[in-house]
């Protein structure tokens, strides 16, 4: 895929992997539709994207809120075409099954699984018109579940199931679906996880968001006759 002039919708675009993917696409001349919770950081990413050669429109939305999600879906569904849809928004809360609040499970479910489902559903017509691609930024927790990670891992396992089912449904119509499973990546979420785990945070030891972005764009760049279905990225050391 050539990205110049293509329309890309990216959730979680104000930081981390979503931001890195947005800026890589901007350098290649894409039209970006950036979704995030923090309007200040989101506009900063949009400005950087414009400076890099892309165009950018921002959509402020808290994906945990029904009204915000529904309004966002309506706005984005008005797009004539979507060439790339990247689901990078995510939240995490740790805790053992015995004591983890059910409310935290609901919150993670809404952002990590329900929102990607709803937005994909709303944008399928535009994706099919463009014969586009959908990228789900999953996690190593989408492949295994460790102690203390039951809630987050459950949502990420669900996200894998969503991607796998969607791929089987839309492949005949020319839409490709990619799941990405980053290991420990130097993002604000990772810093939060380390605080929750009571461990020192050394971001230089981890995969960088830009590393993930480059791999995602490489997968998106394949000709239509090929697809990367699952992509795992791990720190080289540690």
Image: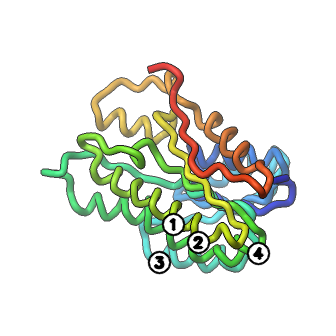
Please say if the residues under marks 2 and 1 sit with CB atoms less than 8 Å apart: yes
Q: CA distance from mark 3 to mark 4?
A: 27 Å
* Tag 1 secondary structure: helix
- For the residues carrying marks 3 and 1, which lies nearer the camera in this image? 1
Q: Which residue is mark 3?
A: 67
Whether residue 40 can be seen here: no
Q: Which of the two residues, 209 or 159, is positioned nearer the viewer here? A: 159
Lower position in the chain sequence, tag 2 or tag 3: 3
Q: CA distance from mark 1 to mark 4?
A: 20 Å
Q: How crowded is the residue under tag 2: few (<14 C-alpha within 10 Å), some, or many (20+)?
A: few
Lower position in the chain sequence, tag 3 or tag 4: 3
Q: How crowded is the residue under tag 1: few (<14 C-alpha within 10 Å), some, or many (20+)?
A: few
Q: Which residue is mark 4?
A: 129
Q: Which residue is mark 1?
A: 165
Q: Is residue 31 above or below residue 215?
A: below
**x and y, in percent, of residue 134 in the image:** 63, 60
* Tag 2 secondary structure: helix
Q: Is residue 154 above or below residue 212?
A: below
Whether residue 173 can be seen here: yes
């Amino acid at each position: 895929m050539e990205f110049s002039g293509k329309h890309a919708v990216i959730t979680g675009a104000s930081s981390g992997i979503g931001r890195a993917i947005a800026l890589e696409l901007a350098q290649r001349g894409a039209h970006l539709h950036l979704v995030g919770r923090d309007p200040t950081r989101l506009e900063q990413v949009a400005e950087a994207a414009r400076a890099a050669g892309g165009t950018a429109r921002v959509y402020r939305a808290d994906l945990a809120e029904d009204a915000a999600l529904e309004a966002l879906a309506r706005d984005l569904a008005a797009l004539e075409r979507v060439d790339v849809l990247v689901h990078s928004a995510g939240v995490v809360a740790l805790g053992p099954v015995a004591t983890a609040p059910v409310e935290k499970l609901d919150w993670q479910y809404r952002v990590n699984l329900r929102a990607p489902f709803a937005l994909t559903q709303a944008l399928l017509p535009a994706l099919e018109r463009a014969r586009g691609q959908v990228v789900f930024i999953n996690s190593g927790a989408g492949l295994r579940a460790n102690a203390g990670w039951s809630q987050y891992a459950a949502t990420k396992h669900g996200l894998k199931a969503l991607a796998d089912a969607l791929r089987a449904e839309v492949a005949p119509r020319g839409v490709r679906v990619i799941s990405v499973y980053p290991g420990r990546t130097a993002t604000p979420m990772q810093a939060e996880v380390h605080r929750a785990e009571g461990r020192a945070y050394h971001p230089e030891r981890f995969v960088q968001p830009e590393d993930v972005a480059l791999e995602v764009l490489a997968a998106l760049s394949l000709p239509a006759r090929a697809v990367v279905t699952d992509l795992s990225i791990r720190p080289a050391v540690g």
